[in-house]
Amino acid sequence: MSAGPGSWLSHVDLAGFTSFGVSARARFFASLQQEDELPTLLQEADDKDLPVLILGGGSNVLLTADFPGLVIQMALTGIVVRPDPLSAEHFLVTAAAGENWHALVEFCLRNQLVGLENLALIPGSTGAAPVQNIGAYGVELSDVLVSVRYFDRRTQQVHQITAEQCELSYRDSIFKHSLKHHAIILSVCLRLSKGAAPVINYPALQQALLHSRRSATQPTSQPTSQPTPQQVFDAVCAIRRSKLPDPQVLGNAGSFFRNPQVTLAHCERLQREWTDLPSYKTDSELTRKLPAAWLIEKAGWKGYRTGDAGVHAQQALVLVNYGEATGVQLVDLARKVAASVQQRFDITLEPEVNILPASVWHA
């Protein structure tokens, strides 16, 4: 690691900045501590004709080669809570993009702000949350998002858009489409409540809550009281820890593929052959969402390993780096998994992980 232009560092290994832990070097690297530093960093990169990569928690990216430009680590921090002027029961929580997402969930829980507990232990930074419209156990960011502030590289201005303008859908947003490569998210604003009941309509969460509450009382008793946000938080953390590997121990980026949506006819055709295939409703009566983990497991990949690249033994949706796997090796494995699912079920799996460069996935 050596000094680059201004406060830049050069030839920085990014293995420690991504949850996959694969080795890839940034030609230049800078940490963004203040919003007003961003235009200067971008202008200097433009002057040198360098591509720019914004890196948050690195939990949803797989690097397959050295990055030839400037990597800007999003290190903006700060959380502000204020009453919602439109509702006496709600509060607005504005969090800087560099805040750790799980730490934000914990902060809200400590302050009796309800709404994020189902999203506990999702790795990454707050700025990445609206890009993916993160979701888990019956809750999505779209349920609580008010607005997003971002810097537009085209206009060189800071803009704020509403949740509706973010065009949020399943693991998708405007930041993956018309604002891709243009918007650098600076902060998000959420609407949370101190009086709302937690969301517990997700079956696996209901089972976990029932089990934990029975264990805390009598084995044969039937809990009837509404679980607290803390209990929901604890249950979500327990579920995730039982199913998903800790990136600090085993390199991974969580779910590698999105759950595919298929036509209702396609779903019914598969369920006639595979009676145990789960399916879930979507926004359309003509489509169904299928669990990618089930498809991958039935295709025989759960627990598969080649060298240091593998499919996790407890969760088939998670690809893991056992130590020295390269990004290319992990992508090669992902391609084989997707090809197998395509051949067996006639379903195309798309990565949820951001593969860089993107062309590698389609090569």
Image: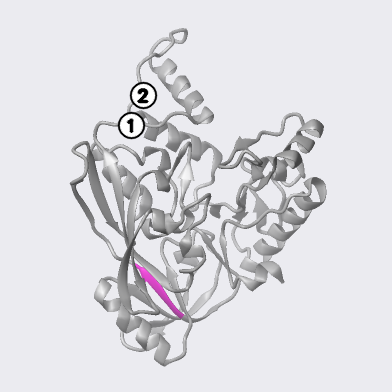
Label 2 sits on residue? 227
Circle 1: element type? helix
Q: Residues within 10 Å of mark 2 (few under 14, many from 20)?
A: some
Separation (CA) of disc 2 from disc 1? 7 Å
Identity of the residue furthest to the bottom in this view = 47
Q: Which residue is mark 1?
A: 229
Residue in front for this viewpoint, 358 or 32: 358
User: In terms of secondary structure, what is the magenta stretch mainly?
Assistant: strand
**Quadrant location of residue 269?**
top right
The foreground one among 89 and 219 is 89
Residue at (38% x, 17% y) in the render: 216
Residue 15 is at least partly visible in this image: yes
Specify whether residue 123 is painted magenta.
Answer: no
SS of the residue under disc 2: loop
Quarter the N terminus occupies: bottom left
- Residue 157 point in image, percent of width and height: 31, 76
Q: Which quarter shows the C terminus?
A: bottom right
Residue 320 percent location from the top left of the image = 60, 54
- Left or right of 274: which side holds 6? left
Can you see residue 4? Answer: no
* Residue farthest to the front, as pictured: 285
Judge whether 71 appears above or below 349 on screen.
Answer: below
Q: Which mark is residue 52?
A: none
Residue 41 vertical placement versus 197 (above, below): below
Amino acid type shown at disc 2: Pro
Lateral position of residue 337 relative to residue 355, left or right:
right
